[in-house]
Amino acid sequence: MAKTKKTKIEGKADVEVLKPPANGAKVYPKWVAWLPWAVAGLALIVGSVGLYQRFAFGLRLTDLGSFVPWGLWVATYEYLVWLEVGSLLVFTLLVYVLKWKTSLTRMAPMLYLSALAILAMALILVGLDLGHPFRAWHVMLYPQWGSPMTWMIWLHMVYLLVLLGKLVLELRPAIPQAKQIGMWLSYLSLPLGIGLVVVAGSVFGVVMGRPAWQSSGLPIMFLISSLVAGTGLLVFLYIWFFKDKDAPDYIQTAKQLGKLLLGLLIVGLIASALSGFVILYPGVPAQATALNLTLFGPYWWVYWIFHIGFGVLVPIGLLLSHSQTARRIGVAAGLLVITFIAVPLNIVIPPQLAVEAVEKGLVIAYQGPGLTPDYFPSVSEWLLTVFALGFGLLVFLIGFQFLNLRPRGAESVKEG
């Protein structure tokens, strides 16, 4: 870790800065290192209000109801699963299947740590979205194997164990046969990860009351989305957290990852366009209404500006620029990761708002709280989401700072 020293700036008090390393890397004020901790702490403090409200008042302070039972928490959960599983899938394919012998292999500890932190966020949100979160253990002891939800929970638990195993092996490389065990755990994570994402998509696809979800292609779209979002996270972590940027293959690896991200982003865009065309062309009201709400409804800007504009067109422009640099690739990846939350939001919410196209008689027959086909996340929902994100960030910071899970130096043993 870089040492600190006092630097006197003319006309100002002494400022404590990080002592520049031998390779002449950029010097940052010491407070920059504490900024993420402050953000995580503030998120936990502010978000704890939402956590208290969830336990004290149940779901009454949310905007969820009979027609829209899944909202911000479920959409964010799916987004986090895509990031977690997708990044590990792409990393495992590149390192263990395609045998990339690059500095990317040294990102393993960082990647497993980020996946664990993201998994913590996801489990908090989906657990508290349940009406009785403390009964979740029933699924483990009394599983109903005919339910996709059961498979999703079991796959999550097994995937968690595999991830923890990989982390332990990274922390204890002296364990006998650690490299061999780690390799087989990585191979095992491939079918587990693919199965988890596909089953998560199937949870939506089997809901009879929401025809916009009923498609054999939805699980495949979930898998494609996971690969795109996960690649974005992998590229982002490599560009901004890899320590040895003077490594001979750093720039080359960054450019290769940028090309991979560009290719997957274009594939995802084409798949999304084809899926939309198949829904809109026949004009089946129960399906087309949901997509029209996404494209032209009151929150059209989430799709066109936030997702397509900042999350697709701007990253593609950066990745296609002639003067390609690692920084531009990192910015493109960061934009994609941040804005990709719009995808699960548009998958989860509009098909539920289109309930009038399916059950109009039922909608107008009963009125009251929770009986309107309308939804926007309440303050309580936003607060609890902030709490989960803050908790995950804290997990990441603890591992990064105290468990020595920074990207390893060139002298470390490469995986694969």
Image (cartoon, helix red, strand yellow):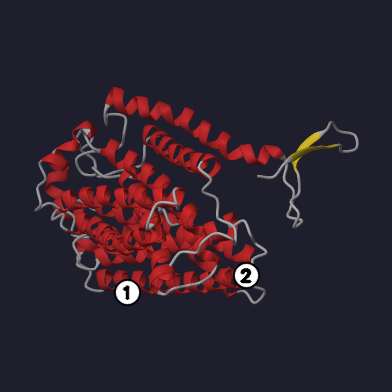
Q: Residues within 10 Å of mark 2 (few under 14, many from 20)?
A: some
Residue that mark 1 sits on: 274
Residue that mark 2 sits on: 251
Of residue 129 and residue 34, the one placed in the foreground of this image is 34
Q: Where is residue 143 in the image (x, y as percent from the top left)?
A: 11, 45
**Does dot 1 land on a helix, a strand or a loop?**
helix
In the image, taking residue 26 as reference, residue 391 lies left or right, namely: left
Q: Are marks 2 and 1 in contact (CB under 8 Å)?
A: no
* Label located before the other in sequence (2 or 1): 2
Height in image: 84 above or below 102?
Answer: above
Of residue 78 and residue 297, the one placed in the foreground of this image is 78
Residue 147 is tagged as none
Of residue 414 and residue 49, the one placed in the foreground of this image is 414
Q: Could you tell me which residue is drawn at 18 percent across and 33 percent down? A: 135
The amino acid type found where label 2 is placed reads Ile
Q: Position of residue 67 (x, y in %)?
A: 21, 44
Cα separation, mark 2 vs mark 1, equals 35 Å
Image quadrant where residue 4 sits: top right
In the image, taking residue 400 as reference, residue 21 lies left or right, namely: right
